[in-house]
Amino acid sequence: MTDAFAKIQALIHNTEQEFVAQLLTVQDRQQLEQLRILYLGRKGRVQALFSSLAQLDPAERPMIGQELNRLKKEFEEKLTAKLSKAAQSAKTIEQFDYSLPGRSPASGGLHPLMQVLDEIKSIFTSMGFRIEEGPEIELDYYNFEALNIPPYHPSRDMQDTFYLDGKYVLRTHTSPVQIRTMERQKPPVRMIAPGRCFRKDTPDATHSPTFHQVEGLCVDRDISFADLKGVVQVFAQKMFGQDVRVRFRPSFFPFTEPSAEYDFSCFVCQGKGCRVCKGTGWIEISGAGMVDPAVFGFVDYDPNVYSGYAFGMGVERIAMLKYQINDIRYFFDNDLRFLEQF
Ligand code: FA5
């Protein structure tokens, strides 16, 4: 083997390695064309190797010639493969229409009941009420006893609930938060307590076994029933506009004296009477009354100094009025066709 033979073999080896390395760094069709010219062009590196065949011993030429043909073929194939790959990705890019409007991600929203609760909270806080909370799994003591409902009292029947054991119940109303707040705080008290309640009620258009209430409590010197009526009237008008009518009816709750229930005029029939208002023209919204002095006894407030009013409104009933929904069960079916409207 001559020196020239060894030298050209080393050159072929290096050229091949450099080509492969450079091909890897090529980014686009233009660079690919430059690489093709550099190696396979008329004045390219493969052609230069062919020209150096003349320096070889004639017996050595066929072997190197074959080697160079193999190299040329390999470069051509590799360049073609890379070119078709580049063409394909360019096509993918061209097929994408950048002028199309973007797809906005589906965003969640607040449940209509939560929206109504937020509105109720903001109306009451604007009137100086603070927001309090209490547990949904409540002690019998707070849910009943401290509200002047002893174990034997028949009014327990109206709020039958789910008992967890002798001591705990799923709270039937938000009124226990009255007691918890008064235990913690001396008068004056002005608070609302929104939250979930549970009863063994058979579902119908206006009743659900799980529902929400907003409790209200105001205790100070010289608080009268007129204050209660004024606050309820302002709330009704802020929530439903000037035309809504409010009526108070006498009622009974062991923890208020005197007690009342108040209704708002029915949205469906404007007070004429329909299925939703059960023919009465009114929808019952809330129980209310003046805090019974016996309740003050449980929290150590002096009934000779302080008086107060309390109410417990049904949030679903308010939402039904607000959005003209004629069946409470829609709120709990979890049907997106309903929920997405809010
Ligand atoms: C009470 O729950 C008393 N705690 C309210 C109260 C508070 C009176 C403070 C006095 C002082 P009542 O059981 O009437 O009262 O319920 C109050 C309101 O909750 C009802 O007017 C109604 O709007 C709503 N409500 C009651 N039960 C259900 C139910 N099953 N489904 C939907 N809403 C209900």
Image (spheres, helix red, strand yellow):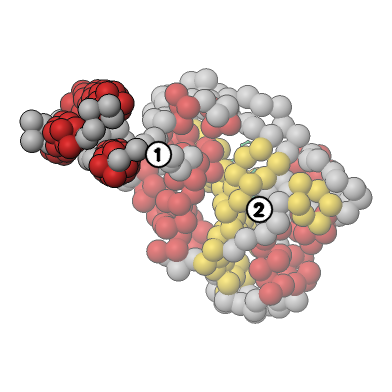
Q: In this view, does 306 lie above or below 117?
A: below
One can see residue 15 in this view: no
How many numbered circles does the render carry? 2
- Cα separation, mark 2 vs mark 1, equals 32 Å
Category of crowding for the residue at label 2, using alpha-carbon neighbours closer than 10 angstroms: few (below 14), some (14–19), many (at least 20): many
Q: Is residue 67 left or right of residue 224?
A: left
Helix or strand or loop: what does disc 2 sit on? loop
* Sequence order check, earlier mark of 2 and 1: 1
Q: In this view, does 137 lie above or below 17?
A: below
Residue type at mark 2 is Thr
Helix or strand or loop: what does disc 1 sit on? loop
Furthest residue in direction left, as rendered = 42
Looking at the picture, tell me which residue is in the foreground, 43 or 27.
43
Q: Position of residue 275 (x, y in %)?
A: 52, 20
Q: Residue 169 carries which label?
A: none
Looking at the picture, tell me which residue is in the foreground, 52 or 187.
52
Q: Is residue 64 above or below residue 261?
A: above
Q: In which quarter of the image is residue 331?
A: top right
- Residue at (65% x, 76% y) in the render: 185
- For disc 2, the marked residue is 174
One can see residue 308 in this view: yes
Category of crowding for the residue at label 1, using alpha-carbon neighbours closer than 10 angstroms: few (below 14), some (14–19), many (at least 20): few
Task: Locate the C terminus and report the quarter of the image it occupies.
Answer: top left
- For disc 1, the marked residue is 107
Q: In this view, does 319 lie above or below 301?
A: above
Ligand 1 within 8 Å, label 2 CB: yes
Looking at the picture, tell me which residue is in the foreground, 311 or 19.
19
Residue type at mark 1 is Ser
- Residue at (45% x, 63% y) in the render: 125
Q: Position of residue 326 (x, y in %)?
A: 49, 25
Q: Position of residue 129 (x, y in %)?
A: 49, 66
